[in-house]
Image (cartoon, grey):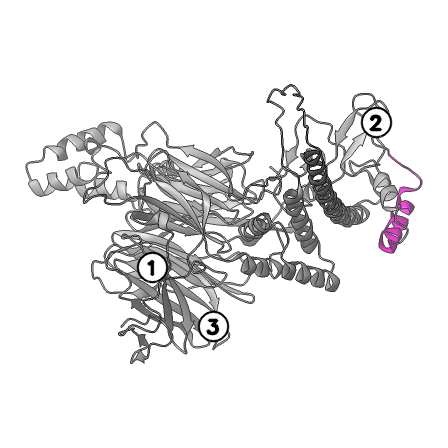
């Protein structure tokens, strides 16, 4: 039965069913403007049609991947504090589809060509038609061009602390990319080629290493070799910490992430990436799991965590209908338990394909325990399954949500902040499902998400929700116009607000992550409101000041600095003339009436008074900005000096200007913490200073400013925001928002300095690229 449902006032039937049979009060009332999600500009046009069953994927570092027929387009959402425009700030990059068609290797080329010729001309129609209809095996059908699927890794996997991107093309080529530089993508590894080479070395044997009994002239063997290396979908796990034994038998912590690849024959191939992953040669084949699922269609990770206990597996769906969880063994992960047997979530073979599998952890409000909620689309229905672990074992509760759509569901998106699910059908209707937990079931409240008029009559091909649930992205195309399909379709990406700026500000202050970059989508909503209203909301300012009085948190100071910077943009006088325009010659105007002179003087006087008030306000906000920056700088200086004190045993000339930092902090006589720290470090230095010197003239570089250094000959160098060393090299890293710079770690630097240089930007928490 369908355990899902609609408004709370609808009386539930037996079997945990809640179905609305009569219209309730207000059902026919059109939504108010506040209920309609606000559309944010710009609307991004796509250069090529969208491709793949799930064309949109939003990353934890606020990048939206869009699969198209020519490339993988990536839109990066930036909370730009230097722009006064109210539109979304988006950086657009792309990963092109390879021009050379990828071909899977299944054996000797001569034997393969002989097999293709044999089966294409086979007199048995049952054999010939099966071969000719297979688009992977039969090259004469033609290969589709475009992206099939994209998957983002968790945050902190690449060398810059950002996400890795796995791409799967329609010709079955699986690659992993990273954005090492700004607006730049680099191919790290081709996993399809790596796995093909591994299969070739093993003679295309199964997991039991038994060699195949037939050759490529057998159709069954030919299909098996192609299907065992044809990817259907891939998904990243969360980050795990394992113990690594070094040469001296000491143990160090090592972080890793797994990429699970679902093959056409049901095999699950696991690849291990040691973090931070920077070189494609470091990828390691981890395991092969034979799921036994026929005609697999979708894949997702199931990860359970309750205190120190962890458990996980891979959810595999089938085009036939069944859904199961396959165990994944992670013996080196502390506290990890492995399932003994596969867990069947749905066993009926009803020929309804399983797609859009989503799994997320929740806290059961009644049992007060961790549990997992799994959802998937099956045609017009949505399948749900609640997994709860008790002392008696694993409890499974499942059912279907029916009556939502008349057409199949094409996309599912989950907002974990408020535990809400958004579904989209082929007719373009988007519905919001909010789960309510009972003793042993789940009831879903269903709401229609009203769409702006600009989306009326357009077909929705996919949706994706941002990391903190602030925005939903939609890819759309024109629908039927005048009973005909349009000859040319312009595919577009739209952004709709799912939260109000007030709700975003509340979540921002209560965020457990304490990182502005991780909450950039919420921060963008607050920025938009400040730019629109030209003032910081009084409730937000009061709550921020109250929290700062309770705890002196750098995260709250960064929010205060951000609000001051955005407010300063709104107070700047508009530019009246452009430098590129030629100046007009002055024209003398003869005014004969004395009344006109008086009116002009009166207007100028009023304008001068308003301008004076605005200037005072700008000065006040600028003073607030400088105070917030100085507080963050001094707080970080003390942390850097603390790291220096803990890691240096004898006086030595290190890259950090220790004496300059101490002299700079000593200017504030009321800072007792820095006074004690400086006293301890001066004892270690034993009157040695180790001054910085200019690389051009060897003159000393005085530490008079924490942002730049100027020698006596006028040579100016910018200072690293993480170590405060003067960057005197041609290459350095810059914050994603171009706020600060940081130097690159050198090979001779000790590990503690390299760790110090891995930190994000001091002022905005953005990664250094």
**How far apart are labels 2 and 3 at the CA level?**
62 Å
Of mark 2 and mark 3, the one earlier in the sequence is: 3
Q: Which mark is residue 711?
A: 2
Say the numbered circle drawn on residue 569. Answer: none
Q: Which residue is mark 3?
A: 364
Q: Residues within 10 Å of mark 2 (few under 14, many from 20)?
A: some
Left or right: 664 as drawn, with respect to 767: right
Question: What stretch of residues is rendered in magenta?
Answer: 671-690
Q: Are marks 2 and 1 in contact (CB under 8 Å)?
A: no
Where is residue 328 shown, x and y percent of the image?
Answer: 42, 57
Query: Is 601 in the magenta?
Result: no
Regarding residue 328, the answer to whether it shows in the image is no
Nearer-N-terminus badge (2/1): 1
User: Residue drawn 91% across and 47% down?
Assistant: 683
First in sequence: mark 3 vs mark 1: 3
For the question of whether residue 53 can be seen, the reply is yes
Q: Position of residue 163 (x, y in %)?
A: 51, 44
Relative to 36, say whether 165 is above or below: above
In the figure, is residue 429 to the left or right of 646? left
Q: Which secondary structure lies at badge 2?
A: loop
Quadrant, the N terminus:
bottom left
Q: Residue furthest left?
A: 123
Q: Nearer the viewer, residue 328 or 152?
A: 152
Q: Secondary structure at mark 1?
A: strand
Q: Between label 2 and label 1, give the one nearer the viewer.
A: 2
What residue is disc 1 on?
A: 376
């Amino acid at each position: 039965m369908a355990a899902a449902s609609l408004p709370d006032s609808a009386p539930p039937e037996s079997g945990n069913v809640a179905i609305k049979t009569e219209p309730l009060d207000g059902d026919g009332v059109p939504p108010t403007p506040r209920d309609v999600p606000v559309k944010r500009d710009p609307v991004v046009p796509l250069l090529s049609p969208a491709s793949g069953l799930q064309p949109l994927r939003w990353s934890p570092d606020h990048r939206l991947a869009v699969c198209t027929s020519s490339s993988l387009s990536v839109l990066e959402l930036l909370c730009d504090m230097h722009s006064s425009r109210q539109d979304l700030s988006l950086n657009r990059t792309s990963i092109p589809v390879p021009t050379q068609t990828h071909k899977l290797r299944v054996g000797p080329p001569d034997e393969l060509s002989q097999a293709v010729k044999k089966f294409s001309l086979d007199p048995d129609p049952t054999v010939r038609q099966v071969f000719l209809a297979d688009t992977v095996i039969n090259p004469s059908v033609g290969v589709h061009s475009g992206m099939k699927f994209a998957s983002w890794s968790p945050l902190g996997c690449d060398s810059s602390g950002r996400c890795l991107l796995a791409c799967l093309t329609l010709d079955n080529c699986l690659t992993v990319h990273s954005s090492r530089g700004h607006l730049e993508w680099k191919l790290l590894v081709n996993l399809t080629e790596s796995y093909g080479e591994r299969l070739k070395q093993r003679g295309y044997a199964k997991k039991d290493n038994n060699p195949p009994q037939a050759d490529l002239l057998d159709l069954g063997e030919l299909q098996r070799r192609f299907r065992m290396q044809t990817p259907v979908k891939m998904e990243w796990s969360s980050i795990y910490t394992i113990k690594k034994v070094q040469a001296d038998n000491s143990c160090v912590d090592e972080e890793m992430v797994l990429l699970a690849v679902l093959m056409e024959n049901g095999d699950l191939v696991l690849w291990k990436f040691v973090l931070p992953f920077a070189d494609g040669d470091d990828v390691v084949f981890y395991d092969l799991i034979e799921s036994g699922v026929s005609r697999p269609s979708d894949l997702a990770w199931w990860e359970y965590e309750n205190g120190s206990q962890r458990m996980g597996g891979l959810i595999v769906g089938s085009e036939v209908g069944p859904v199961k969880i396959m165990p994944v063994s992670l013996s080196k992960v502390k506290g990890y338990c492995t399932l003994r047997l596969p867990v069947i979530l749905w066993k009926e073979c009803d020929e309804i394909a399983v797609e859009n599998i989503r799994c997320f952890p929740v806290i059961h409000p009644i049992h007060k325990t961790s549990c997992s909620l799994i959802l998937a689309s099956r045609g017009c229905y949505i399948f749900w399954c609640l997994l709860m672990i008790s002392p008696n074992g694993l409890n499974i509760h499942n059912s279907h949500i029916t009556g939502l759509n008349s057409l199949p569901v094409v996309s599912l998106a989950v907002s974990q902040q408020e535990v809400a699910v958004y579904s989209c059908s082929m007719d373009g209707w988007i519905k919001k499902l909010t789960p309510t937990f009972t003793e042993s079931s789940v009831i879903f409240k269903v709401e229609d998400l009203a769409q702006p008029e600009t989306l009326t009559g357009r077909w929705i091909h996919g949706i994706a929700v941002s990391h903190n649930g602030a925005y939903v992205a939609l890819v759309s195309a024109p629908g039927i116009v005048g009973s005909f399909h349009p000859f040319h379709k312009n595919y577009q990406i739209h952004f709709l607000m799912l939260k109000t700026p007030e709700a975003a500000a509340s979540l921002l202050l209560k965020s457990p992550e304490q990182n502005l970059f991780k909450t950039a989508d919420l921060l963008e909503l607050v920025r938009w409101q400040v730019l629109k209203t030209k003032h910081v909301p009084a409730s937000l300012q009061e709550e921020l000041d109250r929290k700062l009085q309770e705890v002196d948190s750098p995260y709250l100071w960064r929010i205060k600095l951000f609000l001051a910077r955005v407010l300063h943009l709104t107070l700047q006088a508009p530019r009246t003339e452009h430098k590129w325009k030629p100046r007009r010659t002055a024209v003398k105007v003869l005014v004969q009436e004395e009344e006109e002179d008086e009116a002009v003087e009166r207007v100028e006087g009023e304008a001068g008074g308003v301008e004076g008030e605005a200037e005072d306000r700008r000065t006040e906000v600028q003073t607030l900005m400088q105070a917030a920056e100085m507080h963050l700088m001094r707080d970080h200086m003390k942390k850097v000096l603390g790291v220096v004190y803990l890691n240096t045993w004898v006086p030595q000339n290190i890259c950090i200007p220790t004496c300059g930092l101490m002299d700079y902090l000593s200017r504030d006589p009321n800072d007792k913490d820095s006074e004690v720290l400086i006293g301890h470090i001066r004892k270690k230095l034993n009157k040695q200073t180790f001054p910085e010197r200019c690389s051009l003239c060897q003159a000393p570089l005085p530490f008079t400013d924490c942002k730049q250094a100027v020698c006596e000959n006028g040579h100016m160098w910018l200072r690293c925001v993480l170590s405060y060393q003067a960057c005197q090299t041609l290459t350095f890293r810059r914050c994603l928002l171009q706020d600060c710079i940081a130097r690159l770690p050198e090979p001779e630097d000790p590990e503690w300095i390299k760790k110090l240089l891995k930190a994000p930007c001091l002022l905005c928490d953005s990664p250094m690229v």
